Amino acid sequence: MERQEALDLGRESFAGKAWRQAGDLLTEADRQVPLEAEDLEQLAAAWYLSGGDEESVEAWSRAHHEYLRRGETARAARCAYWLGFGLLLRNEPARGSGWLARAQRLLDEGNLDCVERGYLLVPQALQLMGQGDIRAANDTFMRAADVGVRFGDLELIVQARLGIGQAMIKLGDVGGGLAMLDEVMVAATAGEVSVITVGIVYCATILECRAVFDLRRAGEWTDALNHWCRSQPDLVRFRNVCQVHRAEIMQMHGRWPDAREEAQRACRRLSGEPAVGAAHLLLGDLHRLRGEFDAAEESYRLSTKWGHDPQPGLALLRLAQGQLDAALASIRRVVEAASDRVTRSRILSAYVEIVLAGGDVAAARVAAGELSSIAAAFDAPFLHASSAYATGAVLLAEGDARAANVVLRRALTTWRDLEAPYEEARTRVLIGRVCRELGDEDAARMELDSARATFAELGALPDLSRLEEVSSTAAPQGASGLTWREVQVLSLVATGKSNREVAADLVISERTVARHVSNIFTKLGLASRSAATAYAYENHLV
């Protein structure tokens, strides 16, 4: 192919967002006669977007030096910025910082007042954010936005406002931060900025939505990202980490086979990169939920290898395996070490489940209360539902079935709104137990049957097994209106056990046992433990 033809077709391919084709054609033109700086920039972007990392670095480096040779220092600094920023996103901090430092030096030595100074504020702000100095990061992002406004550079304005939105969320203004991100996304989806910036905005926004548990918004923007990626078949750069978040949304919506396939694809594409740990972690959770315990163990091991804590999934795995002591030790260690609210909110639900299994109702009550406070602070439906489920489980363990019924019904409604079938089914199991406590066996059976159907459809074998245990605990004939738990208490009282001993056997609090004993006496018209014992033997409840 003649050089001019390759060059013209390469430029057309770039304009048409056929990144791989643009890279090949521009490379062919460059092979015959070295490209000018402007075409080298397009070549660098095309390789960056289609996954040719080193080819992209070389092209941007050449464009940088070509601009320097032409005396266009600001344009050279812009190339150094994109080169350095891209290396930072690839987790190559040494090379990335070196190029950014070079860009800063060029501007300082030339004493240039240009928009590129604003661009260089963006990675500085991100570094401050990574160090935990959120206010300084926010101030730096705002300075960058001011520079963008002064020079009328929408690209810089979008990048800076993206950072401002992230900082606002971390400073506690979740609603304001999400509104800022939505505004930034509008500019991105309108095609007003470069594809590289669009991808950065998409992935960062989805990540922030996920971090504050706004899963509905995360799902909407994930769908938008998928549509955007499908319109550019050669696009590789923004498919990988976002792919893990896409798989998480699939898991929540009950599309477990699709989620597993997406996570496995992310594992292949992220092979060798630290972000692969997140994909292995998600696979571990999916294997655990399906009862594939050996596979879950291996996935959690791989997530640890790549720097991702496998908790609380690993503790829940130990619980499912019947290793209660190991589960308690793991989850207690994690809760004690977690300091920020986001991290604690991710593990408190599992903590409540595990400590309740261990009979520590008081600890579960404290944890459920903390989760409720975090949910109120974030005001996210996902957290409200998680909090209501945990609180309902605690109330049920305390013997307050009526109060449990109220909060669990609220959790059920929210899970249904979020289209989270697995969580909805788990909540129905607790509601079924509540109905039994309240003597409504028909309602209990319907709730448990509905949960059973969902678990079977999802392939949640451990939950199906546990559900069979719950389903087999209906009150026997002769119980005279007693709930199944009251029958359990009566049968133990009839053997001569004290309230404390009954509480230990049933893994509930002594106060709950006292309430059950009082209810038994009232329902059966009895006045003493000896009379209750006689009734139990006469009615074959022992």
Image (cartoon, grey):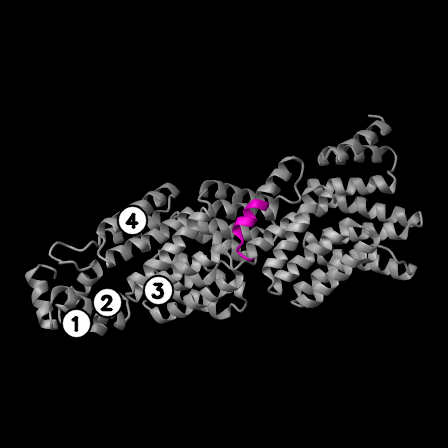
Q: Quadrant of residue 31?
A: top right
Region in magenta: 212-221
Picture coordinates of residue 312 (x, y %)? 45, 60
Mark 4: few/some/many CA within 10 Å (<14, 14-19, 20+): many
Residue position marked by numbered label 2 in the rendering: 505
Q: In the rendered structure, which disc, 4 or 3, sits on the residue that comes first in sequence?
A: 3
* Chief SS of the magenta region: helix
Asked if the residues shown at circle 2 and circle 1 are in contact, with their CB atoms under 8 angstroms apart, the answer is yes
| Secondary structure of residue under mark 4 | helix
Of residues 350 and 118, the one nearer the viewer is 118
Residue position marked by numbered label 4 in the rendering: 448
What is the distance, in whole Å, between disc 4 and disc 3 at their CAs? 19 Å
Identify which amino acid the numbered label 4 is placed on: Leu
Mark 1: few/some/many CA within 10 Å (<14, 14-19, 20+): some
Front label number (2 vs 3)? 3
Q: In the rendered structure, which disc, 3 or 1, sits on the residue that comes first in sequence?
A: 3
What is the distance, in whole Å, between disc 2 and disc 1 at their CAs? 10 Å
Identify which amino acid the numbered label 1 is placed on: Lys
Q: In the rendered structure, which disc, 2 or 3, sits on the residue that comes first in sequence?
A: 3
Image: 27 above or below 97? above
Residue position marked by numbered label 3 in the rendering: 394
Of residues 40 and 397, the one nearer the viewer is 397
Residue position marked by numbered label 1 in the rendering: 497
Q: In the rendered structure, which disc, 2 or 4, sits on the residue that comes first in sequence?
A: 4
| Secondary structure of residue under mark 3 | helix
Identify which amino acid the numbered label 2 is placed on: Asp
Q: Quadrant of residue 350?
A: bottom left
Question: Is residue 297 shown left or right of residue 156?
Answer: left
